[in-house]
């Protein structure tokens, strides 16, 4: 074990972090092989890069009681759900102080969309402006536990920004691989927070491959949610907070949503959302699980396309069959954060979404832009294109019979509009200036 503070830039000593004793290891989503908590790899040794692992915990009534008790403690942000996370910091530190975002009822937007009720989980309010901070917080805590001082990732921008912001708060070093076309707002976050930025003249998928080689060679800690299974656990906390708020501390299911709409890039957020509800059900904290609907941009929709092709067999496919069913596409969408040709967490995402009775759908870019406007004007939430894509999938979800007018709907808004204002501004009419008083 390295000295956890050796080599860090910071002058402050970080609180220590321990493994959650109830986290028992990880299972491969393709072949099911189990790895205990000492396993240092990120993917299954038998299945390679597609053998994404999934964290497993001991269940039982004791854990349910802990989740109820910790859930009361809003001051701890996402760490109030530490019994369901792999690591547990001994104290809150700015490097991992994240979570507790607003859950906004949106009655005017619901009426406009013909819904009985709609709530927005607004993760634009996190420190770097996207839900990705939840994964970065767990990454930094885990890096602290293992004694790493340098983290790295590939990202379309938001995962990178979350790493850059929180690494700066904790005095960690960060190296980030981004596609050269990442929006300027996102690049500004990386550069100003002191990350080493490598702009890859290619797609996100190519940046990801390059990052894996560098991480291995330099022995950095990987903040690639696409293959580090522990980071997906952090992303569960958006759904856990949503469930806590709507069930008034797991005392009633009456207002639990029937459907939760989630944007999909690599498939980590949607896996995590479904997993969170399924874990709550296993613990007896909720009686039913909402249908989780994963929404991809039509120009980057390998999961939605394969889902439609699989017809009625979607829920019965095993990991290897899911892997075979999904063909890569050449991504093309304004929603840069979900512009992914082959989602790395596709098997995990498919199987978790299927387990909730949900589905994958696709949405055209013009509907994403219209949804950005609706969210801003009727609910007071400014989303980037990928952040609005979940709600934008409502029309397709209805057409697919996944949403009934009597349903309660929740949508995760995952990224702030100021990161990429050009996308929506290009579709607004700029007012002509008027003369000032003379
Ligand atoms: C704002 C936003 N929404 C959604 C996603 C998709 O998340 P995932 O890659 O976990 O599917 C991303 C990923 O970068 C994102 O930044
Ligand atoms: Zn495997």
Image: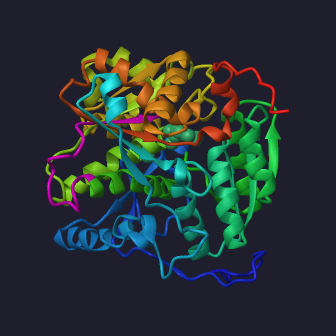
Considering depth in this image, is 18 or 182 the residue closer to the camera? 182
Q: Is residue 432 above or below residue 163?
A: above
Q: Position of residue 388 (x, y in %)?
A: 50, 32
Rendered residue at 78%/75% (across/down): 9
Q: Residue at x 50, y 42 (%)?
A: 414
**Is 47 located above or below residue 2 in the figure?**
above
Residue 261 in magenta stretch: yes
In the image, 261 versus 278, the foreground residue is 261
Q: What residue span does the magenta drawing correspond to? A: 246-266
Q: Which residue shows up at 23% across the image and 30% down it?
A: 116
Q: Quadrant of residue 248?
A: bottom left
Seen in the image, is 435 located left or right of residue 334? right
Residue 354, by quadrant, is top left
Residue 178, x across and y down, in percent:
74, 41
Which quarter of the image is occupied by the C terminus? top right
Q: Does residue 327 show up?
A: no
């Amino acid at each position: 074990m390295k000295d956890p503070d050796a080599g860090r830039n910071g002058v402050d000593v970080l609180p220590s972090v321990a493994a959650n004793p109830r986290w028992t290891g990880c299972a491969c989503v393709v072949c099911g092989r189990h790895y205990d908590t000492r396993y240092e790899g990120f993917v299954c040794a038998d299945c390679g890069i597609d053998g994404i692992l999934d964290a497993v915990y001991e269940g039982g009534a004791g854990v349910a009681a802990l989740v109820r008790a910790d859930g009361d403690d809003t001051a701890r942000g996402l760490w109030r759900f530490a019994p369901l996370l792999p690591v547990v910091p001994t104290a809150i530190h700015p490097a991992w102080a994240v979570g507790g975002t607003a859950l906004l009822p949106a009655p005017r937007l619901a009426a406009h969309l013909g819904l009985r009720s709609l709530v927005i989980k607004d993760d634009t309010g996190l420190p770097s402006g996207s839900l990705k901070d939840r994964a970065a917080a767990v990454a930094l805590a885990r890096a602290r536990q293992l004694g790493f001082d340098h983290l790295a990732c590939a990202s379309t921008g938001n995962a990178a920004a979350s790493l850059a912001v929180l690494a700066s708060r904790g005095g960690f070093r960060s190296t980030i691989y981004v596609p050269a076309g990442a929006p300027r707002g996102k690049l500004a976050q990386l550069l100003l927070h002191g990350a080493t930025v490598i702009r890859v003249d290619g797609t996100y998928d190519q940046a990801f491959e390059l990052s894996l080689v560098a991480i291995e060679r330099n022995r950095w800690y990987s903040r690639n949610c696409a293959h580090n299974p522990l980071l997906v656990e952090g992303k569960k906390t958006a759904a856990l907070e949503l469930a806590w708020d709507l069930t008034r501390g797991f005392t009633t299911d009456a207002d639990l949503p029937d459907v939760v709409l989630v944007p999909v890039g690599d498939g980590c957020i949607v896996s995590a959302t479904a997993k969170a509800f399924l874990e709550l059900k296993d613990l007896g904290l909720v009686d039913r699980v909402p249908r989780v609907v994963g929404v991809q941009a039509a120009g980057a929709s390998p999961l939605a396309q394969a889902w439609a092709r699989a017809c009625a067999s979607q829920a019965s496919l095993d990991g290897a069959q899911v892997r075979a069913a999904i063909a890569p596409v050449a991504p093309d969408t304004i929603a840069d954060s979900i512009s992914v040709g082959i989602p790395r967490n596709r098997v995990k995402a498919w199987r978790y979404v299927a387990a909730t009775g949900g589905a994958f759908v696709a949405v055209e870019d013009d509907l994403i832009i219209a949804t950005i406007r609706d969210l801003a004007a009727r609910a007071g939430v400014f989303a980037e294109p990928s952040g609005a894509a979940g709600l934008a999938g409502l029309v397709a979800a209805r057409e697919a019979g996944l949403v009934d007018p009597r349903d309660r709907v929740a949508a995760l808004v995952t990224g702030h509009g100021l990161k990429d204002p050009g996308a929506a501004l290009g579709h607004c009419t700029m007012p002509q200036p008027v003369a000032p008083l003379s």
